[in-house]
Structures are given as structure tokens and as C-alpha cells.
Image: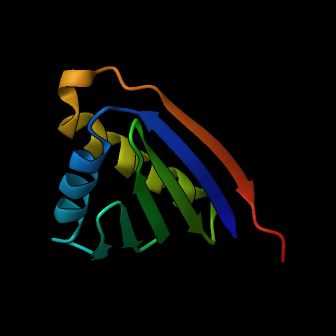
Amino acid sequence: MFTTKGSVKTGNAAKYLVQMCKHFAHKVEVDLGETRGDVSFPMGPCVIIALDDQLTIEAKSHKAEGIEKIKGIIIVHLDKFAWREAPLDYHWDDGQEQP
């Protein structure tokens, strides 16, 4: 399994978590809590967590291309919702789960 852990600084993490999850829920299954959203993308699961000053993202996929697609989806949508804060500074740490 390929993995990625990402983070982006924002003072509006909770707001963007809700916006993204509600948007994604039009196409995929989403479980939204107060500070956590579980998104079931076709390429793999993604967890988005809102902290006080940042959003964190953890995703898994059976293919490296799936991780890149998830990262791309998150970046495109968050950049759209957070346009007032542009440019956002994303940090990603890609890896693989050990069996």
C-alpha cells in the first residue's frame, strides 16, 4: 500500500474541512465529524483532520498513481476554497506501508 501524509497551514482549517467534505460527498462516500473527515475516493481512503492552525491529510492507495491523484484532488479543491490565503504551502511525506 502506498501512503502519503500531508499538511498545510491555515487559520481556517475547520471551515475548509467542512467545505471540502461536503463537496466531495456529492460524488463519493464521506463521513464528516467535527474535526475529521473520512473520504472514500475510488483510488483509496483519505482522512482529513482540522487542527487549530493546519489541515492534515493521510491517504492510502494500492498504486503510486492513486496517491498522486488524491494529492491533486486535495490541492485543487483546497486552493479553490482558500483562494484568499493563496499561495498555500503544502508539505507531503510519501511512503509505503510495511506488510
Picture mark count: 0
> Would residue 65 be found to the left or right of residue 17 on screen?
right
Q: Is residue 55 above or below residue 10?
A: below
Q: Quadrant of residue 10?
A: top left
Q: Nearer the viewer, residue 78 or 15?
A: 15
> Would residue 99 be found to the left or right of residue 50 on screen?
right
Could you tell me which residue is drawn at 68 percent across and 63 percent down?
2
Give residue 12's position: percent from left, percent from top.
26, 38
Could you tell me which residue is drawn at 58 percent across and 68 percent down?
61
Could you tell me which residue is drawn at 46 percent across and 65 percent down?
46
> Would residue 25 be found to the left or right of residue 44 on screen?
left
Q: Is residue 2 above or below residue 30?
A: above
Q: Nearer the viewer, residue 89 or 10?
A: 10
Q: Quadrant of residue 79?
A: top left
Could you tell me which residue is drawn at 37 percent across and 26 percent down?
88
Q: Which quarter of the rendering shows the N terminus?
A: bottom right
> Would residue 4 be found to the left or right of residue 38 on screen?
right
Q: Is residue 48 above or below residue 87?
A: below
Give residue 95's position: percent from left, percent from top.
73, 54
Task: Say how the picture is coloured.
Answer: rainbow
- Considering every residue shown, the one lying at the far front of the view is 52
Give residue 80's position: percent from left, percent from top.
20, 37
Q: Which quarter of the rendering shows the C terminus?
A: bottom right
Q: Is residue 8 above or below residue 67?
A: above
